[in-house]
Image: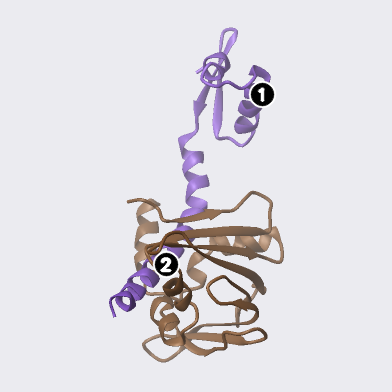
Chain colours: A purple, B brown
Amino acid sequence: MTAGAIAANFDTARPTVSRHLQILTECELLQQEPAGREIYYHINAQKMKEVADFIEPFRRMWEDRFNKLEAVMKTYKKE
Amino acid sequence: MKQKTRIKAEEGRQDLLITREFDLPLELLFKAYVEPDIVAQWMGTKVLKLESKKHGSWQFETTNAQGVVVFRANGVIHEFIPNQKITRTFEMENAPGSAVQLEFLEFEGLTDDTSKLTMHVVYRSAAHRDQVLKLPFAYGINGAHNRLQNVVSQLN
């Protein structure tokens, strides 16, 4: 998508959207592809996954632990 | 499946937030943090000591099937307000490169049958926090350990 097409989806001012796109590009979450006078932005799915995966095992560890807590305490609830 | 546990870890900060909503009344959620035999059940570790009071201390230990200690942690309790708040430290023993962390646990009732836990964990530095985030298996204190490893190996 072009910056204009992306900005059209938001109520935010165009320069603000451009700034966000610039930051996301610097973080490699977006990739730029120049085409004539336009620049197309693509999502870098691999990088998105890396960012999500970074915390996911940690989150899952707590999720498992809390699920267990909930299961254990539900037996007390019945008593 | 809906993710009940959320982690908020902003870039460059030395703290993080863990939040979780439970299908449990507030009193039962809090009890899970107080009774040593209950803590042992859900944490999957031996509770050597758990003095749930101001200036109290705690110590957990996990041994493997051969009786070798694979995990030991301890800390002190700074604040203990039943059904509201526990402030404590957490330190892993015999873990090179680790450092004590400060944990603020806040408990709140949502409805008669649901409750919420907010854990604010403060680390010595942003780098130390990221190190803990990257090595969830370092704790190795629950039975989910192997399951977790399977899940992660599928991701790779």
Say what secondary structure mark 2 lies in.
helix
Q: Amino acid at mark 1?
A: Thr
First-in-chain label (1 vs 2): 1
Query: Residue, x 45% and y 69% (percent of image)?
Result: B26
Q: Which residue is mark 2?
A: A66
Please tell me the numbered disc located at residue B63.
none
Query: Mark 1 packing: few (<14 Cα in 10 Å), some, or many (20+)?
Result: few
Q: Amino acid at mark 2?
A: Phe
Q: Which residue is mark 1?
A: A16
Residue B95 coordinates in the image, percent (x, y): 60, 78
Query: Residue, x 60% and y 32% (percent of image)?
Result: A24
Residue B61 coordinates in the image, percent (x, y): 50, 86
| Drawn side of residue B142 relative to residue A50, left or right | left
Query: Mark 2 packing: few (<14 Cα in 10 Å), some, or many (20+)?
Result: many
Q: Nearer the viewer, residue B42 or A48?
A: B42
Query: Farthest residue in the left direction?
Result: A78
Q: CA distance from mark 1 to mark 2?
A: 40 Å
Residue B156 coordinates in the image, percent (x, y): 40, 52
Residue B19 coordinates in the image, percent (x, y): 51, 58
Query: Residue, x 36% and y 71% (percent of image)?
Result: A68
Q: Nearer the viewer, residue A48 or B121?
A: B121
Which of the 4 image quadrants contains residue B56? bottom right
Residue A6 vertical placement versus B96 (above, below): above
Which of the 4 image quadrants contains residue B16? bottom right
Say what secondary structure mark 1 lies in.
helix
| Drawn side of residue B93 relative to residue A74, left or right | right
Q: Chain of mark 2?
A: A
